[in-house]
Image: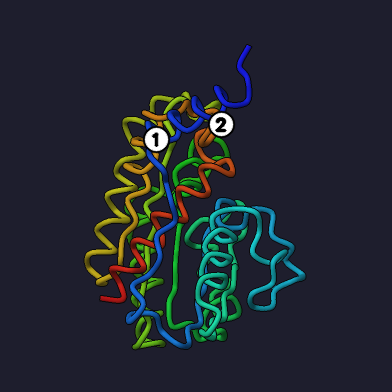
Amino acid sequence: MLNRRSFIKSSTLGLAATPLLQLPNLTTEKIPDQVTLLFQGDSITDAHRVRANYYPNNGQGMGNGYVFHIVTHLMGNYPKTSWQCYNRGISGNKVFQLMERWEDDCLQLNPNVLSVLIGVNDFWHTLTSSYEGTVRTYENDLKTLLTNTKKELPNLQLIIGEPFVAKGGTAVGDKSWVNTFPAYQEAARKVANELGAAFIPYQQIFDDALKLAPVSYWCPDGVHPSMAGAYLMAKGWIEAFEQLMK
């Protein structure tokens, strides 16, 4: 049986041997005083947010996923800034459904920074919901949506998250996830490059995380991250945002 001293010693050694996935702080001189930040996407961004609480910086309105981690980190670490943060992710959405609500859920908010994570349903629903869109549909819709948004908001800065799959998750056994889904990821990267957006390589982030703990820890169904997976996503987002500010 471990006594208290032995337990503390063994715990300390364990921590020393484990990489600490800390949320990074932004470089002080690069922190904008005022930013309107909008998160858009599907259920991964939605994360069970209370949609009636749509005001900026509302805790319940941020959901319980990666957006909440990001916003609490920014607000807690930089209290002298005036940031207006909105979450408008809606579960089940594909790109064309973002288009249908874009005036209300993006343009009228006039964001300085737009973060978009979309694409898993554009593929997944071809397997489960008789959706007939293709990777070309996804790429064209995403490029059209964001190009038109940049025309309306010429000073807008973009962050595009790579749609990802955590290999071995309970919902992703179909081989199409391995054979076809990477084309959607490449399409997202291509659009990001063409529009000068920061790109978050979420697939690599989760692939690396699976070397530390099993998929059940990070993202049990392979699509929707756990609390730990959401934390990883927030870390990747903040790193991308840092690059965008340079």
Q: Is residue 2 visible?
A: yes
Name the residue type under label 2.
Answer: Pro
Q: Nearer the viewer, residue 38 or 127?
A: 38
Query: Is 57 above or below relative to 43?
Result: below
Dot 2 alpha-carbon crowd within 10 angstroms: few under 14, some 14 to 19, many 20 or more: some
- Image side of residue 63 versus residue 128, left or right: right
Q: Which residue is mark 1?
A: 16
Residue at 69% over, 60% down: 49
Secondary element at tag 2: loop
Name the residue located 43 percent from the left edge and 51 percent from the top edge.
Answer: 22
Residue 141 appears in view: no
Q: Residue at x 56, y 84 (%)?
A: 109
Distance, label 2 to label 1, CA atoms, is 27 Å
Q: Which residue is label 2 attached to? A: 220
Observer-nearest residue: 46 or 178? 46
Instruction: Kindly report which numbered mark, 2 or 1, lies closer to the viewer in this rendering.
Output: 1
Q: Position of residue 54 (x, y in %)?
A: 70, 74
For mark 1, give the secondary structure: helix
